[in-house]
Image (spheres, coloured by chain):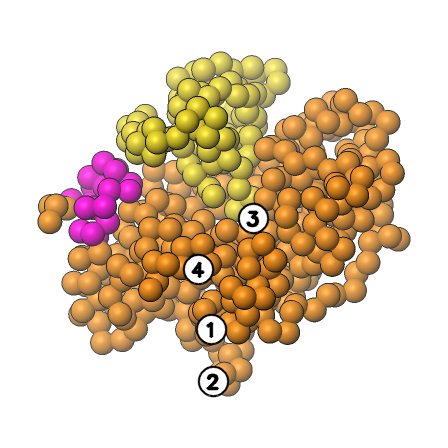
Chain colours: A yellow, B orange
């Protein structure tokens, strides 16, 4: 299902229009085509099927991550990774 | 009971005490009304949340949910799944699509079945992965079967833009993107045969959140303004949905009819303009699109603009892709469920001939469909 776990931007490649983001410890490369002009390292973004959709405030991001932490704590490493990756993979 | 301040809701989006406190507020507010309020949560993600957290049971008797059509794989008619299947079976084609599509059955089987019959079908997390597949397989035609609402459309567009930039000429797209406001309008406008008048069952809407991050809340303006139906755009967490309901009920008790945003941490009126531009560049309205369970709805989907006919799999493979409509199953009442006239459990074959493993109708196809959500979390209802 659609989750909205905020991801932190750790590296930006302007040339390729991609960024490396960290979603609760899981890192991956995403497209920044829609936030290219504003996004900075350290920003929090919401990812949907491999792209950053928007930038959200740090305050909201941290509050949201806190909630997901509790849920994900109950899972093992592999389950956690899967849940994080699946979370933004719904077509809705 | 926990003392509640709405601005502190971010504390915990799933906190049971917060959910209960919101439920109490909704009860208090709804008691002022001398009528029933039927709220459609348009998005399948919301349906899932409502069923999973038992929010339905936390509502007063006069506040009811109608489960909407916002599950992009559920509403995909069989003939389009057949397109994907047929394309996948072509010798030189690699069919790429999102994971949600794996099990959805067409009349020839699902894409998983196609794969077990030798087709090269790849399920990806992101359209970006398709670019890689196209680069690695220059002698193949890569067909991206694009699905989803306004939320995923810009990502398909960005994929096309990237392929253009890289000069990739082996990446085609089969477009099945659908749009939310048109189906909402259809549900309100549609004739209700049971009472022989226009549908008056939907009193208010909970607007999809991810769709609105991209398209902006503005796309729902017409519903309060023209149709007298308030809309609150809500997030997916249970607390978000409960707060969304409370905001809607308050509109009724205060005699307001407005478009409001509950999910302020991500949604603005305008949405993501860069993403909207990207959609505009590659896609245009399709005059008619058939929704499984609901039939043909004008302007409710997108197609590639004519300039991009050279990458349009639907045009290129026109000769082998059938256009005959395939009827929905006779016993399936998904249409009625989506119009708020029936509940999943009223269907004769619910949970017997129709299950998530062997879905007969659209609402059972993915866990975000109403019937599948009732099937999975149904114990809570008893
Ligand atoms: S249970 Fe199956 S057949 Fe019945 S309405 Fe739901 S999806 Fe349709």
Relative image position of residue B162 (x, y in whole percent):
68, 27
**Is residue A82 positioned above or below B250 on the image?**
above
Q: CA distance from mark 2 to mark 4?
A: 26 Å
Precedes in sequence: disc 1 or disc 3: 3
Q: Are marks 4 and 1 on the same chain?
A: yes
Residue annotated with mark 3: B149
Q: SS at mark 2?
A: loop
Q: SS at mark 1?
A: helix
Q: Quadrant of residue B27?
A: bottom left
Precedes in sequence: disc 3 or disc 2: 3
Relative image position of residue B252 (x, y in whole percent):
26, 66
Say whether residue B197 is magenta.
no
Q: Chain of mark 4?
A: B
Q: Are marks 3 and 2 on the same chain?
A: yes
Q: Chain of mark 3?
A: B
Residue annotated with mark 2: B195
Q: CA distance from mark 3 to mark 2?
A: 31 Å
**Mark 1: few/some/many CA within 10 Å (<14, 14-19, 20+):** few
Q: Are marks 1 and 2 on the same chain?
A: yes
Residue at 56% over, 16% down: A14
Which stretch appears magenta? B5-22
Q: CA distance from mark 3 to mark 4?
A: 23 Å
Q: SS at mark 3?
A: loop
**Is residue B153 positioned above or below B65 on the image?**
above
Residue annotated with mark 4: B374
Precedes in sequence: disc 2 or disc 4: 2
Q: Chain of mark 1?
A: B
**Is residue B69 positioned above or below A81 on the image?**
below
Tell me whether the residue at label 4 lies in contact with that at label 1, contact meaning CB atoms closer than 8 angstroms: no
């Amino acid at each position: 299902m659609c989750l909205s776990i905020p991801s932190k931007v750790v590296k930006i490649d302007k040339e390729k229009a991609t960024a490396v983001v960290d979603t609760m410890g899981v890192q991956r490369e995403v497209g920044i085509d829609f936030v290219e002009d504003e996004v900075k390292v350290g920003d929090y973004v919401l990812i949907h099927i491999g792209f950053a959709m928007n930038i959200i405030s740090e305050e909201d991001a941290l509050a949201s991550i806190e909630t997901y932490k509790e849920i994900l704590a109950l899972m093992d490493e592999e389950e956690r990774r899967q849940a994080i990756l699946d979370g933004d993979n719904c077509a809705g | 009971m926990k003392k509640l301040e709405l601005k502190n809701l971010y504390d915990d989006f799933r906190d049971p005490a917060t959910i209960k406190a919101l439920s109490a507020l909704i009860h208090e507010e709804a008691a002022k009304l001398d009528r029933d309020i039927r709220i459609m949560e348009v998005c399948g993600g919301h349906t899932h949340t409502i069923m999973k957290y038992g929010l339905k049971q936390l509502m007063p008797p006069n506040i009811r949910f109608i489960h909407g059509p916002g599950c992009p794989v559920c509403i995909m008619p069989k003939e389009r799944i057949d397109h994907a299947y047929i394309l996948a079976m072509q010798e030189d084609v690699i069919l790429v699509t999102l994971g949600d599509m794996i099990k959805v059955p067409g009349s020839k089987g699902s894409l998983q079945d196609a794969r077990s019959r030798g087709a090269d079908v790849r399920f990806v997390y992101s359209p970006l992965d398709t670019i890689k597949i196209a680069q690695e397989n220059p002698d193949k035609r890569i067909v991206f079967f694009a699905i989803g609402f306004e939320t995923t459309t810009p990502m398909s567009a960005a994929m096309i833009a990237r392929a253009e930039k890289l000069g990739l000429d082996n990446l085609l797209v089969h477009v099945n993107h659908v749009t939310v406001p048109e189906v909402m309008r259809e549900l309100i406008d549609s004739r209700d045969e049971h009472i022989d008048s226009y549908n008056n069952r939907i009193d208010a809407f909970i607007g999809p959140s991810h769709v609105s991050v991209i398209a902006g809340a503005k796309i729902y303006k017409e519903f309060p303004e023209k149709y007298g139906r308030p809309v609150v755009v809500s997030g997916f967490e249970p607390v978000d949905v409960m707060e969304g309901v409370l905001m809607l009920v308050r509109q009724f008790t205060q005699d307001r009819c407005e478009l409001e945003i509950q999910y302020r941490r991500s949604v603005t009126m305008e949405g993501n303009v860069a993403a909207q531009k990207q959609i505009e560049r590659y896609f245009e309205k399709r005059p008619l699109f058939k929704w499984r369970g609901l039939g043909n709805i004008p302007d409710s989907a997108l197609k590639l603009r004519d300039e991009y006919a050279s990458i349009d799999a639907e045009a290129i493979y026109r000769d082998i892709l059938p256009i005959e409509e395939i009827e929905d199953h006779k016993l399936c009442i998904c249409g009625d469920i989506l119009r708020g006239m029936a509940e999943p459990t009223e269907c004769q074959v619910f949970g017997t001939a129709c299950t998530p493993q062997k879905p007969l109708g659209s609402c059972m196809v993915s866990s975000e469909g109403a019937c599948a959500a009732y099937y999975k979390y149904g114990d809570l209802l008893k």
